[in-house]
């Protein structure tokens, strides 16, 4: 995978994770909510939403409400689980929360399924 393809996949995952998080906080998620959450411009989010629709990760109602498809939800939940477990683990290791969250955000995109499963199993065995 080229650097540009990797960054594109990372961006898709970040958007889907954000939509998932916002959908747990808001009755309806709109592009403006995503733009505000990520501190991105409205045009950038609009382009991203078009891309996500074309990939069948989201649907957008006539009212502009964004919903994750089954495929989008599955990917968003995977990324969110990785982020949550990795950030919690780093915090338990003594990393400052803001650093742990930032590091987990980078790690969630690059860690292999095998390595993540091993870390998750190790953490579960500690609790």
Image (cartoon, rainbow, N blue to C red):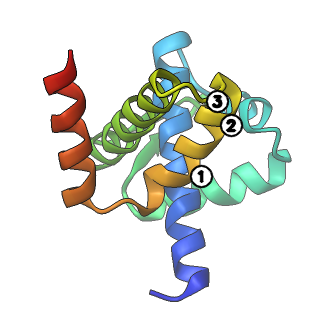
Badge 3 density bin: few <14, some 14–19, many ≥20, Cα 10 Å: some
In the rendered image of this protein, does residue 2 appear above or below residue 77? Answer: below
Q: Could you tell which of marks 3 and 1 lies nearer the N-terminus?
A: 3
User: Residue at 19% across / 47% down in the picture?
Assistant: 117
Query: Would residue 49 be seen by someone viewing this image from the given angle?
Result: yes
Q: Is residue 90 above or below residue 8?
A: above
The residue under the point 53% across, 61% down is 10
Residue found at the far front of this picture: 94
The percent coordinates of residue 114 (x first, y second) are 19, 59
Q: Label 3: which residue?
A: 30
**Label number found at residue 95:** none
Is the C-beta separation of discs 3 and 2 under 8 Å? yes
- SS at mark 2? helix
Reading the image, the residue beneath label 2 is 31
What secondary structure is found at the residue carrying circle 1?
helix
Q: Quadrant of the C terminus?
A: top left
Disc 3 and disc 1: Cα gap in Å? 10 Å
Q: Residue furthest bottom?
A: 2
Q: Helix or strand or loop: what does disc 3 sit on?
A: loop
- Residue placed under numbered mark 1 in the picture: 49
Residue 40 location, quadrant: top right
**In this view of the protein, which residue sits in the foreground, 41 or 14?**
14
Classify mark 1: residues with Cα within 10 Å, few (<14), some (14-19) or many (20+): many
């Amino acid at each position: 995978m080229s650097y540009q393809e990797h960054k594109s996949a990372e961006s898709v995952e970040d958007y889907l994770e954000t939509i998932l998080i916002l959908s747990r906080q808001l009755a309806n998620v709109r592009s403006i909510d995503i733009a505000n959450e990520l501190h991105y411009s409205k045009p950038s989010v609009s382009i991203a939403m078009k891309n996500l629709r074309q990939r069948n990760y989201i649907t957008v109602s006539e009212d502009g409400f964004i919903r994750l498809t089954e495929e989008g939800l599955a990917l968003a939940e995977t990324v969110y689980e990785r982020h949550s477990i990795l950030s919690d683990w780093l915090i338990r290791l003594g990393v400052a929360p803001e650093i742990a969250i930032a590091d987990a955000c980078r790690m969630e995109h690059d860690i292999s399924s095998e390595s993540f499963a091993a870390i998750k199993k190790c953490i579960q065995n500690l609790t």
